[in-house]
Image: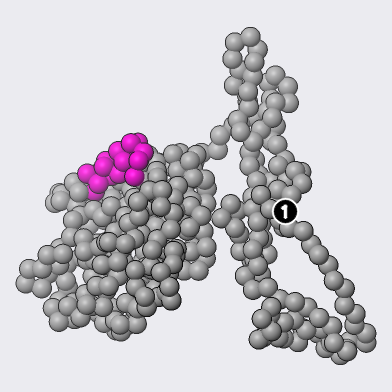
Amino acid sequence: MKSTEGHFSVPPFRRTNFGAAVWASASSSHFSTAQNTGECDQFSAGYLLRCVGPLLHYAKYNVQPKIGVPRLQVASSNHSSSNRTANFGDGVCHLYKDYKTCAPAELRRKCSNLVATLEAVYDYVCSSNVLKYFSAHLDCLLEVDSHDPGVLNCEQNATESLRQIASSTDKSGDERVDRQCDAVQQYFYCMMDKYLNTCGQEAWQLKVDITKRSTSVELANCSFVTTPKPRDFTKPKCRDKGVCLCHNGYKLKDNSTCEDIDECLQPGLCSQTCKNEPGTFTCLCNENYYEKSDDGRRCIPTQPYLFFAHGQSIWNITLDGKDFQLKKASLQKTAMLDLDVEVPRH
């Protein structure tokens, strides 16, 4: 980060590939999103930088993982009692929480032009609803981000387009924002199919949400199309000699029509609820008590309880016996029944 007379400057376009948008957005080149307006003086900016420094350092040297290493080592003993392997949240998200504790809300508001993008990205990534899907898709997204020539070309083109737009002086502010919106939209169009076909819908939505947040500071009024146009998979592809094939998730009904396969008819495919969709399926869990496994098929209890009847009431108790709750009272008669439910495992 360069400073000249209290003004912070950054390149006109911050990388938006998945890895960069998550952790490189916290690097020095992403720390500032606009020039200092004057309200955030040098002392305030310096104090803020001291608070965010550990996060920047960790992001630079620990979080950018090598492809093929699915877990990250927690370097600081403050967040781990042993030298164990941990996921993204154990490292970066703890440090992000420390940053927000160190920097008072008023200071972050005062210098919001310096940290708006960083906070927009990390508030999203470190939310509990996102973290539980993050580790399941991180490796695939990083693989595509770093190794796919087509995606790299999409990023290079978007980078160049946004740099040209930012440096142009012949357009009004609204026209410039419209052109920036168009450039990011073309970026989505360019790489959409690759991520959807390689990593799936859930991973693609993570990619989209992080990219939008990494640009939302300047492009707050943009409206993006991030879903592909519906494709007709009911028509088979036929080769010579009358051999016809259907797309994955469909089966040949006759020589001219493909029909959807109901995967949910397969016993044990999902441990709780299976939802059939055109060409695919989705496993659902009761989100009040379960979270999805990494493969998206099994439901893992977030906090297991044992239920027991006592007199005219029903209680539940944690497995360690430290917490119990009354669930139903003043019943005429209660009884206990043990069930051993086998959960399908793949």
Coloring basis for residues = one colour
> Which residue carries the number 1 mark?
344
Left or right, residue 88 beside residue 157: right
Residue sitting at x 27%, y 72%: 54
Residue 173: horizontal and vertical position, in percent? 22, 57
The main secondary structure of the magenta stretch is helix
Q: Is residue 322 magenta?
A: no
In this view, which residue lies farthest toward the top? 241
Residue 292: horizontal and vertical position, in percent? 61, 59
Q: Residues within 10 Å of mark 1 (few under 14, many from 20)?
A: some
Position of 187 relative to 174 (above/below): above
Q: Does the magenta stretch include residue 148?
A: yes
Q: Which of 278 and 19 is in front in this view?
A: 19
Position of 45 relative to 128 (above/below): below
Quadrant in which residue 315 is drawn: bottom right
In this view, which residue lies farthest toward the right? 332
Residue 58: horizontal and vertical position, in percent? 30, 66
Position of 166 relative to 254 (above/below): below
Residue 202: horizontal and vertical position, in percent? 52, 51
**Count of numbered badges drawn on the protein:** 1
Left or right, residue 328 beside residue 185: right
Q: Give the range drawn in magenta.
A: 146-162
Per the image, label 1 sits on a secondary structure element best described as loop
